[in-house]
Image (cartoon, rainbow, N blue to C red):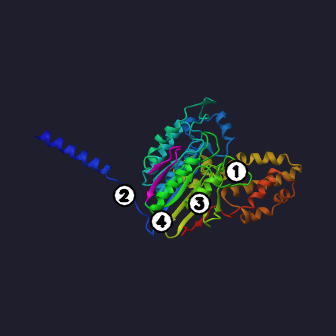
Amino acid sequence: MKNIILIMGVLVFIFIIAATYLIPQEVPMINIDESINMYIVADPHLMSEKMTDDSDTFNNYLSTVDRMMKYTGFFLDVIEDEVKRNRPDIVVYPGDLTNNGSKVNHQEFEKHLKRVKATGAKVYVVPGNHDIGNEKALYFRSDKLHLTESITYDEFSKIYDDYGYKDAVSKDENTLSYLVKPYQNLWLLMLDTTKDYPEPGGYLNRDTLKWIVTCSDMAKEENAEIVVVMHHNLLDHSEIIWEDYTLDNNTSVINTLHECDIQVVLSGHIHIQDIKSHTSVKTGNTIYDIATSALPVFAHQYGQLTYSPSRGYDYETIKPDIEKYALDNKIEDENLLSFNEYSEKFFIDNLCRKHKESIELLDISDEQKEEVFKTVTEMNKKYFSGYRNEALEKLIETEGFKIVEGLDECFIQEYIMGMIKDQNADNNKIHIPVNN
């Protein structure tokens, strides 16, 4: 008799647990006087420490990229700390989750997402061009470079099932794009925009555009706003660097998103902090493409989008205090304890190197080349941090800038002049009212 009672008790317990999971979880509503906070962590490019060593081969590799590959895992630790302390409602990762798409890197990144989700945040990802079928999936061992296992298209959605795909209310049949409904009145359209993995270019085919319209119709029926999250850029964020960054068929995509009354696109890929907008001639409505800079690239920041049904959208960048985090966590790495100085030096040595090579080709004196390089370096730091136009006023008055102005037409001149002919002076903050 006791065994029967025990068995019945166990069955009742199992039934209660099962019923709990079977009951549909109610999707919350953002009330008119409430707001939600969303973090945007762009292009983290995780390179697991399991895949590296302290060798000349690895260190030589580090000097060829603009991102701090040695500290990508550390930066994600900082993000986890920021999420735990500040408790955003949503965290999105718009692609290039890993540096080279290796399976080990994806498995480690998934562990990071699990810890972020454990805080109560809703977490969503889309792939970037680095993430799938990457023939350059590699690791460093014994001073040699080795190829390792990458992941397939299908494996991506399985690894990240708990971070969007399982909760999708609709999935595109042609891509890894999906629609999620974190709130009744705020939905996220997570778009897979890579044209041909692992090539860098972006594209959305006609069938996917039709699916986007279908998603929009669903949202309009429920009076919900849609925010788009994607890896590639909708609009050109540079007059001279746009190929393979902006979607190949961005005109068609722009028209589709205007048709859907979508206002906000969150992108990454280009690694600079920049906001561009496009206004429809037909409707007068404006769509904003907010490109958040890459986390492991100077100025090492992430974005925050706050949405309120009454006030609209407010976007700003957040720059975590890396040195304080390192100190508080008793990290002994001097590069991290003096991070502000180290990051500027890394940026100049790695990213500004190509500009220095271009300057060396100019037909001017060595002293003038040095002045030009100093100005280009300072403008580049501002540029990647999101500042343009009058925000560069002090640098426009330098001797180096005046020399650039007087040059014959060349790349350096075009690049520098593009910084002072931009749409916005400060791309770190913007308010976007909701369309009526």
Residue 176: in magenta span: yes
Q: Give the numbered dot on residue 35.
A: 4
Q: CA distance from mark 4 to mark 1?
A: 34 Å
Q: CA distance from mark 4 to mark 2?
A: 18 Å
Residue on which disc 2 sits? 26
Q: Are marks 3 and 2 in contact (CB under 8 Å)?
A: no
Which of the two marks, 3 or 2, is nearer to us in this view?
3
Q: Give the numbered dot on residue 258.
A: 3
Residue on which disc 1 sits? 242
Image quadrant for the N terminus? top left
- Could you say where residue 232 lies in the image, as x and y percent from the top left? 61, 49
**Exactly how many numbered labels are in the figure?**
4
The residue located at (12%, 41%) in the rendering is 2
**Amino acid type indicated by mark 2:** Glu
Q: CA distance from mark 4 to mark 3?
A: 24 Å
Q: Give the numbered dot on residue 231.
A: none
**Amino acid type indicated by mark 1:** Trp
State which region is magenta: 169-183
Marked residue nearer the N-terminal end (3 or 2): 2
**Amino acid type indicated by mark 4:** Ser
Which of the two marks, 4 or 2, is nearer to us in this view?
2
**Amino acid type indicated by mark 3:** His
